[in-house]
Image (tube, grey):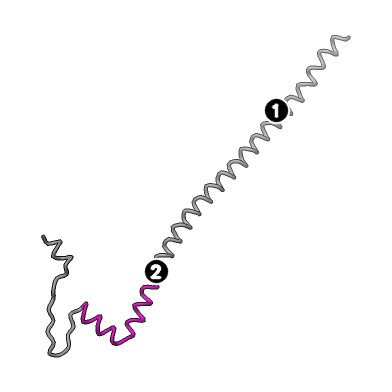
């Protein structure tokens, strides 16, 4: 009878091993799923930081352009500045005044 008890003992251990194996595989699967989620979130964070950097650069450019245009607008509200601007950039002259166009020193160096 002792032999029968010994043969039954391994059968009892086998179900415990399968339960432990199933539990281990389940834990591994859950761990892999959680690691995938963390990696995905880190990737999204990196992408968002890169996009934020690009948008901040664009904002700085637009802010500088806005500042330049605001300054130009304020200057163009001054009649004396408008007159000087038109005379220098568009060769506008007063009555009886002659305008001579002289090339700048940069243009003469480029032509050589």
Magenta region: which residues? 62-89
Residue 91 in the magenta stretch? The answer is no
Q: How many numbered discs sit on the rendered protein?
A: 2
Q: Label 2 neighbourhood size at 10 Å, few (<14), some (14-19), many (20+)?
A: few
Q: Quadrant of residue 8?
A: top right
Single out the mark in the foreground, 1 or 2: 2
Taking the image as shown, residue 17 lies to the left or right of residue 49, namely right
Disc sitting over residue 49 in the figure: none
Identity of the residue drawn at 61% across and 40% down:
33
| Residue farthest to the bottom, as pictured | 95
Q: CA distance from mark 1 to mark 2?
A: 64 Å
Look at the picture and state if 90 lies above or below 8.
Answer: below
Residue 71 or residue 26, whichever sits in front? 71
Which is nearer the N-term, disc 1 or disc 2? 1
Residue at the disc numbered 1? 21
Question: Residue 79's spot in the image, x, y percent?
Answer: 29, 87
What is the quadrant of the N terminus in the image?
A: top right
Dot 2: what SS? helix
CB under 8 Å between callouts 1 and 2? no
Q: For the point 13% across and 65% down, which residue is it? A: 108
In this rendered view, identify the residue nearer to me: 85 or 1: 85
Helix or strand or loop: what does disc 1 sit on? Answer: helix
* In this picture, residue 26 sits left or right of residue 85: right
Q: Which of the image's four quarters has the C terminus?
A: bottom left
Question: Residue 64, which numbered label?
Answer: 2
From the viewer's perspective, is residue 97 above or below residue 56? below
- Residue 60 image offset from top left, x and y in percent: 42, 65
Query: Where residue 82 appears, x then y in whole percent?
Result: 27, 83
């Amino acid at each position: 009878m002792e032999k029968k008890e010994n043969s039954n003992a391994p059968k009892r251990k086998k179900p415990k091993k399968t339960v432990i194996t199933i539990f281990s595989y389940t834990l591994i699967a859950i761990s892999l799923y959680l690691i995938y989620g963390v990696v995905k979130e880190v990737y999204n964070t990196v992408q968002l930081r890169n996009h934020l950097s690009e948008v901040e650069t664009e904002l700085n450019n637009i802010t500088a352009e806005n500042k330049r245009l605001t300054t130009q607008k304020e200057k163009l509200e001054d009649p004396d500045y408008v007159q000087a601007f038109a005379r220098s950039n568009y060769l506008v002259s007063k009555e009886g005044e002659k305008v001579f166009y002289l090339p700048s020193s940069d243009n003469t160096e480029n032509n050589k």
